[in-house]
Structure formats: C-alpha cells, structure tokens
Amino acid sequence: IKNLKILNMYKRAPNSDDYWTVGAGVMMTGSDISVHDNFMSDAFYCVSIGGGSVAGTSRNIKIYNNEITHCDVGLNAALGTDGVSFDGVEIYNNHIYGSDNWDGYVPYNPYDSSRTFHRRDGIKLWGRPTDLSSSIKNLFIYNNVIGPDITKISGASSGAIVMDTSDFNNV
C-alpha cells in the first residue's frame, strides 16, 4: 500500500460528544505487507494491523515513510483474540501528529465504561487474548517523529508509544 492520500474517514470536531470507534484509514492482517509513502488524515485508526478475530501469525510487516495526522491512534497493532501473533514488524520514519481534534469527553463507551476520554496515541500495541498463544515478536520501532499535539490530557490514557497487556519479545 503506497503513495495514497487517505482522507476524512471520520472528521471529528474537538469536544464533540460522539463515542470513539469510528473510521479507519488502513486495516489489515496477513504477511509480507508494506504500508509506505502515504498521507493519512482524519480517522480513528489511521493504520491498524490485527485486532479482528482471525487467528494466525502475521509476518514481515513494514510501516514506514508515512505522514499521519488527526487520528486518535496513528498506528495500532492489536492482538484482539486468542492465537493472533505478529512476528517481524518494523515501524520507522513516520511522522504522527495533530490529534487535538480528538480532545473531549466520551459520554458513552460501549466497550469500556471506565474510559471517558479519547486516547490520542501515536503508536499503540495492545492485546486481550485469554490464553498465552498470542505474542508480538521481533518488533522494531525507530526514527519516528511523534508530535506535536499528541499529548496526555486530563483523564486520558494517552501517549506517544503505548504497550498494553501483551507478551512482547525482542522489542
């Protein structure tokens, strides 16, 4: 996936009262995939690998030289179900910035009632498998510029690079 402009999958107004799971630029699972030299703007996830219910290992994924702006989560790698794994993921030379349009309170989150603010993550790696068959191995994140306007706001669990509830090897 290269040389694309992916725009306005969901154009959110700051401090609006909508909840968060709308709009994605590129969503993928599989092996030997490259996403590079693209401009992506205005989506919940700009680039997302995994996260679905397809078990198996995705290998040799490269995400590089992209400009990503106005997304709640710039790059997302999700182990969304048992048996999903990544092996050989490289994330480099991307510029991720400008998520301030995702500021605001979320009045209702159907997936997590304790979360009431958007995350505003530059790069997010996470998982929810119930067994230990899921993992991320050989993950390389380097030479990315994250910011400006990717900041922690009061009440949000946001950050430049977030790793949550997964087994990571060779990071």
Image (spheres, rainbow, N blue to C red):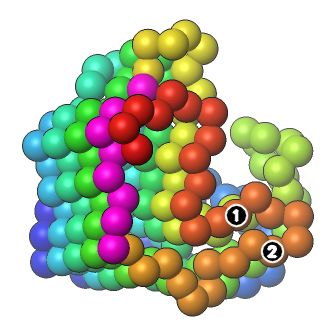
Q: Position of residue 53 (x, y in %)?
A: 42, 25
Q: Position of residue 26 (x, y in %)?
A: 32, 59
Placement of 91 over or under 66, stated as above or below: above
Residue topped by disc 1: 158
* Residue located 44% across and 21% down the image: 134
Amino acid type, mark 2: Ile
Q: Look at the image and give the residue range highlighted in magenta.
A: 135-143
Which x, y percent locates residue 81? 49, 23
Residue 118 appears left or right of 167: right
- Assess whether residue 141 is covered by the magenta stretch: yes
- Alpha carbon of mark 2 to alpha carbon of mark 1: how far? 7 Å
Count neighbours of disc 1 (C-alpha within 10 A) and say few if under 14, some if 14 to 19, many if 20 or more: many
Q: Residue at x 49, y 78 (%)?
A: 146
- Secondary structure, magenta segment, majority class: strand
Please say whether residue 33 is visible from this viewpoint. yes
- Could you tell me residue 34's position as x and y percent? 15, 56
Residue at image mark 2: 153
Q: Look at 78% across and 41% down and name the residue there.
A: 112
Of pointers 2 and 1, the one earlier in the residue sequence? 2
What residue lies at 46% left-to-right and 34% top-to-bottom? 168
**Height in image: 150 above or below 46?**
below
